[in-house]
Amino acid sequence: MADLLELSSRIVDSGVAENPHNRVTQELSEVTDDIAVIESFSHVVLVRTGDGLVAFDSSGVMTAGAVVESMRRWTGEPVSHVVYTHGHADHVGGSPAFVADAEARGHRRPVFVGHENVVSRIDRYELTNGWNVAINQRQFGWLRPDSGMTLGGDQRFLPADVARPDVTYRDRHDLTVGGVEMQLMHARGETDDHTWTWLPAQRAACVGDLFIWNFPNAGNPQKVQRYPDEWAAALRAIAAHDPELLLPAHGLPIAGRDRIAGVLDQVATALETLVADVLEAMNSGASLDTILHSVKVDPAVLRLPYLRPLYDEPEFVVRNVWRKYGGWWDGNPASLKPAPESAVAAEVAALAGGADRLVARAGELAAGGDDASMRLACHLIELAAKAAPDDPGVHEARAAVYEQRRRREMSLMTKGIFSSAVLESQSKLDDGR
């Protein structure tokens, strides 16, 4: 089946995203001889060899069952290896389903392969389970006001029986299975444990999340350090192999040497330019506040169908560049050893004549509807909420401001965080009834 490749070619060549391209259909498509993609969250790429299948990623705990069913409708061959592109939950969380499938069929357990930092990532997730449950609830919009969900709880971020890598490597690992040669390469980008794989005979690159059909997830306000400059370098390294098939873990596969070279170059250039602009401003002595509101990505770049800021966004990437090269202090002397936010809010509210004055002004600004006014409205409504944390009128207004803000934003991360603010204030209102 060539439908996925035809669709991606049409989108890339036209520059118009006429159809959804980050899909979770659980369907398998054979994109070339002996290579198939199961569209899930995340995708699983399957390579058929003379000694069973090699799977790239296992999808997440909620989707892996459907992935295995799709795989088994394609072939009953054993899974020889599972290669983790990185240790995020939607890539390793489905591993128990692959183990269970092997046991049920009397096959040998797959060999799990990943970069050495996947192990430390899994350890970190165990240490911060509650935190990771909470931030992913916010990030993916599970905390919509009508969801009934609360932060944290007893959920597990990763299943207890997630398969840790049996084989790890540091820089490069050459793997040959059933006569199929695979060259595993380490890169840092979205994570510090990323693997992309070159299949020389197929001239295919399995790239995990180094290409996601969105602006690169190199910012993410709730998670650990990302590496936008090294991400760009990884894309350049992939392009240097002149791949004829690009296999990402989210979005559509892409075929055609020139087409792939073009998209990799544009994504790498967008990251390189953003990093260079931030570093230039840092080297001139600019504060984080100045850089956040002056360094921008060309809007024409953000209109490309594989660079739209629908998941992460450039403003968050700016913060990660600052964090990597400049530390956590933002350059404002008052924020070095700050007073409690509630104390600052109480002082401002007193100067304004009460929290209700802040609420009123926030409402006036929100009525303007433009980005600058909405940003100010959120500052004022937060001050009001911290100055009068039990005031129902304040929380009613806060919920309304953040719901309005959520509706006008593009990126999933931003929408998720603003949704959680709405839920927080609505919960306060419910508690007071």
Image: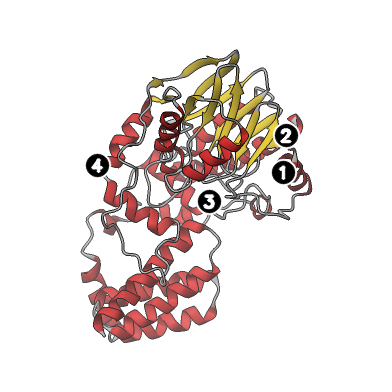
Mark closer to the chain start, 1 or 4: 1
Q: Amino acid at mark 2?
A: Ala
Dot 2 alpha-carbon crowd within 10 angstroms: few under 14, some 14 to 19, many 20 or more: many
* SS state under label 1: helix
Sequence-earlier tag: 3 or 2: 2
Location of the N terminus by quadrant is top right
Can the viewer see residue 347? no
Which of the two discs, 3 and 2, sits closer to the camera? 2
Which comes sooner in the sequence, label 2 or label 4?
A: 4
Q: Are marks 1 and 2 in contact (CB under 8 Å)?
A: yes
Q: Is 409 above or below relative to 364?
A: above
Q: Which residue lies at the image location 37% right of the left edge and 68% below the top edge?
A: 421
The amino acid marked with disc number 3 is Pro
Residue 314 numbered tag: 3
Could you say whether the residue bearing mark 4 is in a helix, strand or loop? Answer: helix
Q: Which mark is residue 8?
A: 1
Q: Position of residue 44 (x, y in %)?
A: 55, 37
Tally the numbered discs.
4
Q: Are marks 3 and 2 in contact (CB under 8 Å)?
A: no
Q: Is residue 347 above or below residue 286?
A: below
Residue density around tag 1, few if under 14, some if 14–19, many if 20 or more, within 10 Å: many
Q: Is residue 41 above or below residue 115?
A: below
Name the front one of labels 3 and 4. Answer: 4
Relative image position of residue 232 (x, y in whole percent): 56, 34
Q: Residue at x 55, y 73 (%)?
A: 370
Q: Which residue is mark 4?
A: 127
The answer to whether 164 appears left or right of 369 in the picture is left
Measure the C-alpha gap from mark 3 to mark 4: 30 Å
Rendering coords of residue 25 (x, y %): 60, 49
Which sits earlier in the primary sequence, circle 3 or circle 4?
4
Labels 3 & 4 near each other (Cβ < 8 A): no
Q: Residue at x 47, y 48 (%)?
A: 318
